[in-house]
Image (spheres, grey):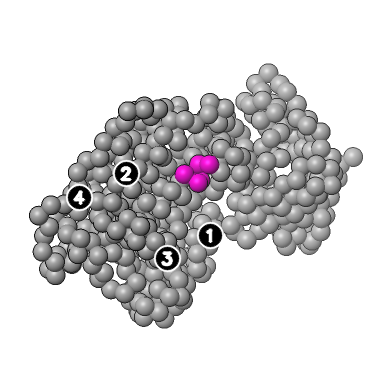
Amino acid sequence: MTDHNDLKFKIAIAASVAEVYSAFISASALTEWLCDVAQVDAYEGGRLYLWWSSGYYANGEFIEVRSDERLVFSWHGRGEPGATQVKIIIKPDEQGARLSLLHQGIGGGKVWFQARKAIRKGWRQALENLKSVLETGRDLRLLRRPVLGVSGLDELTPEQASLLGLPVQAGLRLHGVLEGQGAQLAGLQKDDIIVKVAGRKVAGLNDLQAVLQQHEAGDKVKVWFYRGDERQSVKLVLSSRPLPEIPETAAELADQMREIYHRLEEELNNALEGTSEEGADFRSTPGEWTVKETLAHLIAAERDAHAWIARFLDGHEAELWFPTPHISRLSATVKTFSTLKALRDELRRNQAETVALLAGLPPEFVARKRSYWRLGYGLLNLPAHFRDHVQYIGSLLKMGREQYPLAEEVATQTSPLLDIEVGSTD
């Protein structure tokens, strides 16, 4: 028996009943279409916890679990007047599966008005996205979320703020701005510290993501930032997100990444041409990275990508990663690979390992479109991060070359590592 306040949804999905069912009982699957963090114990009496970067979360307990057929769990979201219940029924049909979702126990009156409205909107968007990720792999949350138009952002630490003499302890530091996009057109510059967007403080990347989720490309938002010790604000038009085409097979994705690495290698060669070991150790100001530390950061990005891929393959949550920029990690890499050539060789080796990992992706993983598309999307966005740091290297060396002579021999030789066929024993 249902109540007039209950919310009912039905949707046909061109995927197997088993695929649709698994999307509700796997933590990693839930983060690929519904939430940002999930903890799931899918058995009767087991718990459910879901979290969104907006700050909303919901928890509950599984009441009924029938494999590939039916799920019932309690639901209590942040700010909601009381606990409710979600019932999911999955049945096969000619196109694949038909899903029915009933969210019941929602109260009436003013006390429930806003919560009911938000729950309805949330399930409509989520189920539309579930259909998309299961049928095509494409996460509509990423497709629709706008961007500022920057080439990268780092979370400001109190130590960095102190070194830079900033009057704030938290914010997002710009690596650079992208040609023709919102940030550049609004006048933002490299090293600006963004502290508020659309009236909301942004101390971290999750804060910014939560703001952008509430907007679309073309929306105009006010951005507050520091340039040096001066607080400023601009109106910024949010840009649409550039989306790479994800190759259909693992072999094609590996080949595409191999070609990308070759092009990035050439760009890095050009940036490092004529650089001495002394020049690569030049530090423009306290807290800024040297060329060697920047190369160590690019190595860390590849290593983190390997761990990220491994989490995918193991079926764990695998949110899009951000390489750890902590100076202790970078210093350890530079200490271990102390010359430009050694750092370049280590970077190439890690890139070659990334290519090998992609070429060896299991067929069953590639067939799981929701995971394969997300992996490809993350990796094909790496070049923008790489180029941002190559640009930084170029500007740093321009400052440092007045103090250090050009080296007669530079470690910019092309390594054969990325030309080795995956699986070759040569």
Residue 242 visible in the shown view: no
Residue 48 visible in the shown view: yes
**First reached walking from the N terminus: tag 4 or tag 3:** 3
Camera-nearest label, 1 or 2: 2
Q: On the rendered structure, is 135 left or right of 238?
A: right
Give the main secondary structure of the magenta stretch. helix
For label 1, the SS is helix
**First reached walking from the N terminus: tag 2 or tag 3:** 3
**What span is colored magenta in the figure?**
306-310
Q: Mark 1, residues whose alpha carbon is within 10 Å: few (<14), some, or many (≥20)?
A: some
Residue that mark 3 sits on: 328
Instruction: Identify which amino acid the numbered label 3 is placed on.
Output: Ser
Q: CA distance from mark 1 to mark 2?
A: 31 Å
Q: Is residue 419 above or below residue 351?
A: above
**First reached walking from the N terminus: tag 1 or tag 2:** 1
Residue 9 on image: x %, y %? 72, 38
Q: CA distance from mark 3 to mark 1?
A: 24 Å
Q: Mark 4, residues whose alpha carbon is within 10 Å: few (<14), some, or many (≥20)?
A: many
Quarter of the figure with the C terminus: top left
**First reached walking from the N terminus: tag 2 or tag 4:** 2
For label 3, the SS is helix
The residue at 32%/65% (across/down) is 289
For label 4, the SS is loop
Q: CA distance from mark 2 to mark 4?
A: 13 Å
**First reached walking from the N terminus: tag 4 or tag 1:** 1
Residue that mark 2 sits on: 348
Label pair 3/1, CB-CB below 8 angstroms:
no
Instruction: Identify which amino acid the numbered label 2 is placed on.
Output: Arg
Instruction: Identify which amino acid the numbered label 4 is placed on.
Output: Ala
The residue at 49%/31% (across/down) is 361
Q: Is residue 408 above or below residue 91?
A: below
